[in-house]
């Protein structure tokens, strides 16, 4: 029995929905450079553009961490210079 026939029987009997039987795409196109990436990729392999919301959140968190670190450093330097 072929896979198509098995899928149709499962859909007909209500075991799976019609959309479950269809294969999911395995490629995703980068909106910045149009390179075709694997659907599991979080970042474009050419231009490193974030392809998923979680990848975007990771980048924003890293930027926020750097900002906090720089702010702390400059405050520390200011205090150190004022105590001399």
Image: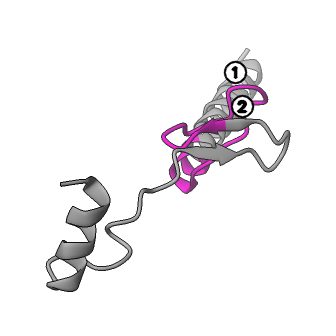
Left/right of residue 8 with respect to residue 55 in the rendered view: left
Instruction: Give residue 81's position: percent from left, percent from top.
Output: 76, 19
State the CA–CA distance, disc 2 to disc 1.
44 Å
Part of the protein shown in magenta:
37-58
Q: Secondary structure at mark 1?
A: loop
> Which dot, 2 or 1, sits closer to the camera?
2
Sequence order check, earlier mark of 2 and 1: 2
**Where is 63 relative to 57, above or below?**
above
**Camera-side residue: 23 or 78?**
23
Dot 1, how many residues are within 10 Å of its Cα: few (below 14), some (14-19), or many (20+)? Answer: few
Task: Name the image quarter holding the N terminus.
Answer: bottom left
Q: Secondary structure at mark 2?
A: loop
What predominant SS class does the magenta segment belong to?
A: loop
Task: Name the image quarter holding the C terminus.
Answer: top right
Left/right of residue 75 with respect to residue 35 in the rendered view: left
Left/right of residue 1 with respect to residue 48 in the rendered view: left
Instruction: Give residue 46's position: percent from left, percent from top.
Output: 76, 26
Is the residue under label 1 in contact with that under label 2 (CB below 8 Å)?
Answer: no
Q: Quadrant of residue 80?
A: top right
Q: Residue at x 68, y 26 (%)?
A: 45
Q: Quadrant of residue 6?
A: bottom left
Q: Is residue 9 magenta?
A: no
Left/right of residue 63 with respect to residue 55 in the rendered view: right
Q: Is residue 57 magenta?
A: yes
Q: Quadrant of residue 18?
A: bottom left
Q: Check the image and name the residue furthest to the front.
A: 1
- Mark carried by residue 83: 1
Dot 2, how many residues are within 10 Å of its Cα: few (below 14), some (14-19), or many (20+)? Answer: few
Q: Residue at x 85, y 39 (%)?
A: 33
What residue sits right under mark 2 in the picture? 48
**Camera-side residue: 28 or 23?**
23
**Camera-side residue: 30 or 79?**
30
């Amino acid at each position: 029995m072929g896979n198509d026939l098995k899928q149709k029987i499962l859909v007909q009997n209500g075991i799976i929905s019609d959309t479950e039987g269809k294969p999911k795409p395995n490629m995703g196109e980068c909106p910045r450079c149009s390179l075709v990436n694997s659907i599991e990729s979080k970042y474009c392999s050419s231009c490193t553009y974030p392809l998923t919301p979680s990848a975007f959140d990771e980048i924003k968190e890293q930027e926020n961490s750097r900002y906090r670190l720089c702010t702390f450093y400059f405050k520390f330097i200011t205090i150190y210079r004022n105590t001399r």
